[in-house]
Image (cartoon, helix red, strand yellow):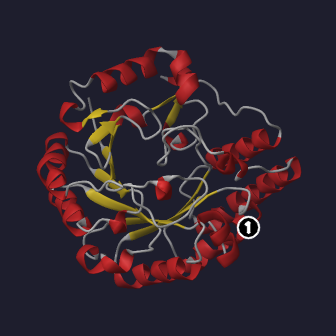
Amino acid sequence: MYFNRIFLLVTDACDSRCTLCDYWLTKNPKFIDSDFVEEKVASFIKENGVSVVCISGGEPSLHPDLGKIVRSVRRAGATATLTTSTTRLETRFEEIRDLVTHYMISLDGADRETYRGSRGIDLFDHAVGWIRRLRVETSADLAISCVLQACNIASIRLIYELAIELQVNRIFFRVPDFKPHSFGRSGLTRSKTLKQVEVTPSEASALAADLEWIIKADEKHKLLGQSSGNLRRKAQFFQCVSENADYEEEDQLCDVPLTSLVIHADGTCRPCFYLPQVQPFNRAPLEGSAFLDVHSRMLNDKDFRKQWCNACQQFDGHKHLIERL
């Protein structure tokens, strides 16, 4: 097996209040043991030549040993992408200033109102301030991640224009994922969460038009981290939502579970954040039955791909039509 990417979820704790996510509802959040990262994860990175480690959570800046974790990743030879809302970045910044190679900043609004509507906290100015500061004080690559939802889809042109103003390297537009085991969920997805994407057909059509505007504008600015086809699938997703229809793509195979590893704060792991198969990290992945089963079923089971992958947009830049394999 070949691994080129690890998603390291260092904590379940989060101090945002996003309706689309349940991490902040976790009563006893876990924090990954930094010695475990240094001794076990770093060894895995070296032995397998892993080139990219994405450090996330929850909110990773809440982890008291974040500096040690990032240092272990870099010493092992991988780049370090930190996905953060920036809420507690000040407390860790001096430790990680020269270690983080890429930042993925969660910014789901173009102003205080839309940011508060999506993330449940009034820290828009704080997040924007950190993007400006990182641009000046580090050489890291900066990206914005914006999750599209009912409260912000009318503002996506403004979000794109803000990305231009902030001089970030990339912007990604994403759609929510409602799988009951993802984003800190431990059961059925809350009805309040599902309502966060309720849009009318006219709103879905307006979103499609705005995405076409962004695609055209990006011919000049080159900020999009996604293809035009990728973005148009976001419009299709919301069109299906507005019509109460299931979203499903052509039969495709995603290479992320075949080349990646997700490690959780409790020391377990899985092939993909959006798949339910979990096993202890010390069995992963060469002899782990969860990994071997997922890989086999992804390659050979069309029904498995349909259930878990063909309606998932989270890694659609890594999908390939089966007929092309």
Q: Residue at x 78, y 52 (%)?
A: 208
Q: Amino acid type of disc 1? A: Ser
Query: Which residue is nearer to you in this view: 3 or 146?
Result: 146
Q: Residue at x 54, y 30 (%)?
A: 309
The residue at the far right in this view is: 202
Residue 261 in the image: state x and y as whole percent: 32, 40
Q: Residue at x 54, y 40 (%)?
A: 316
Query: Which residue is nearer to you in this view: 62 or 89?
Result: 62
Residue 137 in the image: state x and y as whole percent: 35, 84
Residue 45 in the image: state x and y as whole percent: 19, 47
| Residue 129 sits above or below residue 324 on the image | below
In the rendered image, the quadrant that contains the N terminus is top left
Residue 68 in the image: state x and y as whole percent: 19, 65
Q: Tell me if residue 272 can be seen.
A: yes
Instruction: Determine the secondary structure under disc 1.
Output: helix
Q: Residue at x 37, y 55 (%)?
A: 28
Q: Tell me if residue 111 can be seen.
A: no
How busy is the neighbourhood of tag 1: few (under 14 within 10 Å), some, or many (20 plus)?
Answer: some
| Residue 114 sits above or below residue 314 on the image | below
Query: Which residue is nearer to you in this view: 321 or 280?
Result: 280
Query: Which residue is nearer to you in this view: 225 or 96?
Result: 96
Query: Label 1, on which residue?
Result: 155
| Residue 190 sits above or below residue 57 on the image | above
Residue 100, image quadrant: bottom left
Residue 281, image quadrant: top left
Residue 57, image quadrant: bottom left
In-image side of 68 versus 140 (left or right): left
In-image side of 11 versus 234 (left or right): left
